[in-house]
Image (tube, grey):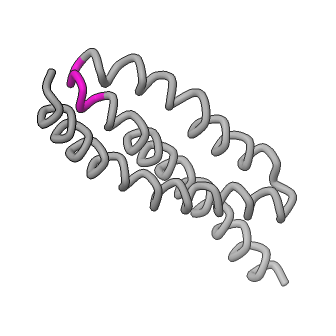
Amino acid sequence: MDDVAVQQMIKSGILIFMWSYILCGLNAIASFYFTSIGKAKESAVISSARGLVILLAAIFVLPAILGMNGVWLASPATEILTLVITLFYLKKDRKEIDDAKQAE
């Protein structure tokens, strides 16, 4: 493989991979939030999903399906799927807060 081909592969890969940083921040902040309000289970699920469970599945599945792009997409896909879990927990937490306010 020549230098130009490697440079092109890295350029396209970095453009795909960089999106995971934005989502990573959102998921990390949500995990910190749940830890700070004493909901360790939710925090642990978010952290475990993005750092181990979903990431490992994405690393094994996506490259087999998409080749080299699958390698680059493993991190963004992990963060997107973790964001779905995060949004579920945030919605549930918001409902609990609203219910507690109504009970007052």
Height in image: 94 above or below 61?
below
Q: How many marks?
A: 0
Instruction: Report the magenta stretch's main SS.
Output: helix
- Place of residue 51 in the rendered image (x, y in percent of width and height, measured from the top left): 61, 36
Q: Which of these two is toward me, 3 or 15? A: 3
Left or right of residue 76, residue 83 in this image: right
Residue for point 24% across, 26% down = 68
Residue 56 picture location, percent across and down: 51, 23
Check residue 36 for magenta coloring: no
Give residue 47's quadrant in the image: top right
Position of residue 8 measured from the top left corner of the image (x, y, whole percent):
16, 41
Q: Residue at left 38%, top 34%?
A: 74
92 sits left or right of 56 in the view: right
Left or right: 36 as drawn, with respect to 23: right
Q: Residue at left 43%, top 39%?
A: 75
- Write down the quadrant of residue 98 in the picture: bottom right
Q: Is residue 101 above or below residue 32?
A: below
Q: Quadrant of the N terminus?
A: top left
The answer to whether residue 70 is left or right of residue 100 is left
Q: For this rendering, which residue is in front, 77 or 67?
A: 67
The quadrant of the rendering that contains the C terminus is bottom right
Which residue range is magenta in the image?
65-70
Q: Position of residue 91 (x, y in %)?
A: 57, 63
Q: Hey, which residue is sitting farthest front in the picture? A: 3
